[in-house]
Amino acid sequence: MDDGKVGKVYIVGAGPGDPGLLTLKAKTLLETADVVLYDRLVSDEILNIVPKTAKLVCVGKASGGDEKTPQHEINRLMMEEACKGKKVVRLKGGDPFIFGRGGEEAEFLARNGVPFEVVPGVTSAIAVPALAGIPLTHREYSSALLILTGHSAAEHEDEKRKYEELWRHAAKLDCTLVILMGVKSLERNVALLLESGKSPETPVAIIERGATPQQRVIVGTLRNIVEVTREKNVKPPAVVVVGSVVRLREALKRSLES
Ligand SMILES: C[S@@+](CC[C@H](N)C(=O)[O-])C[C@H]1O[C@@H](n2cnc3c(N)ncnc32)[C@H](O)[C@@H]1O
């Protein structure tokens, strides 16, 4: 399609990895896209849905390197392909608006008058614990949920202080904490929670590569989770759950695993 008409960008959530967790809308868009710009965490099974005739571009890493494609370059690619009249799918892991920079990309497209639509996805924050047998709320355990990033983008001292303050507040809330991008910073964040009064016996689960055949679930408490994680050599991507709901896994896991 290159008939002078402006195309459209679809900012689509791919869910946590299992193609069965794609929305029907996401699947249809992938089957009919001209161009797919995808992030590193999108699974191969999902990318296999894209027809061979479509242009498939990984923007999670610059070619051959560890560096991500810069955001301004991703923005440029989306706009360029849409202006050629193409149907562009900007495919992101989980939900595009949960720590996925989908908001920034939507702002860019809106500012530049490029037609776009958002297709929400199943976020790893909720689906990964669920698949590991951890309901994030439960009438007897927790009636609220806070989703945090373990990795702060803060560069300035006052921003760093604000981020630490958020963790200190979080420690005082009687709710489930779900931490994305939380493996590398686990030691510092666990220390912040403990210093701010969270009980060392609070249960913690770390779910590595959830919703994939490689899923591992590591369980401990705030007292020992840093050590256990080190022993088991836990690597990103992983979702960290802090709170008493983690105890429910014991009762649910046998049925889930059989
Ligand atoms: C940049 S954030 C993007 C989150 C995404 N937008 C979402 O809604 O799931 C990436 C983080 O999501 C989490 N994550 C995404 N997919 C995961 C998976 N299959 N298993 C465990 N964690 C996952 C990890 O914490 C990872 O570091």
Image: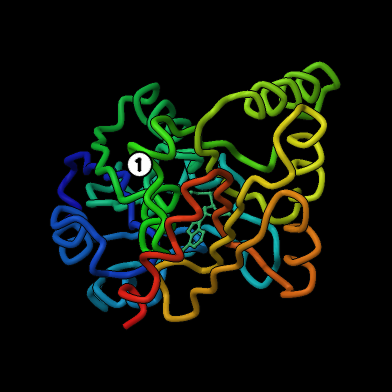
Report the side of 68 relative to 178 (left or right).
Answer: right
Report the side of 190 relative to 257 (left or right).
Answer: right
Determine which quarter of the picture holds residue 46: bottom left
Is 143 situated above or below 149?
above
Viewer-proximal residue, 219 or 58? 219
Determine which quarter of the picture holds residue 105: top left
Q: Secondary structure at mark 1?
A: loop
Is 171 situated above or below 223?
above
Q: Residue at x 30, y 49 (%)?
A: 121
Q: Residue at x 74, y 44 (%)?
A: 200
Report the side of 198 relative to 1 (left or right).
Answer: right
Residue 225 screen position, x and y as percent: 73, 58
Viewer-proximal residue, 132 or 70? 132
Viewer-proximal residue, 28 or 36? 28
In the orientation shown, which residue stands out farthest toward the right? 157
Colour basis: rainbow
Residue 210 screen position, x and y as percent: 46, 66
The crowd level at tag 1 (other Cα within 10 Å; few <14, some 14-19, many 20+) is: few
Report the side of 155 relative to 140 (left or right).
Answer: right
Q: Which residue is under mark 1? A: 138
The kind of residue on which mark 1 rests is His
Q: Residue at x 19, y 55 (%)?
A: 23
In this view of the protein, can residue 57 be seen by the observer? no
Can you say which quadrant of the picture contains the C terminus?
Answer: bottom left
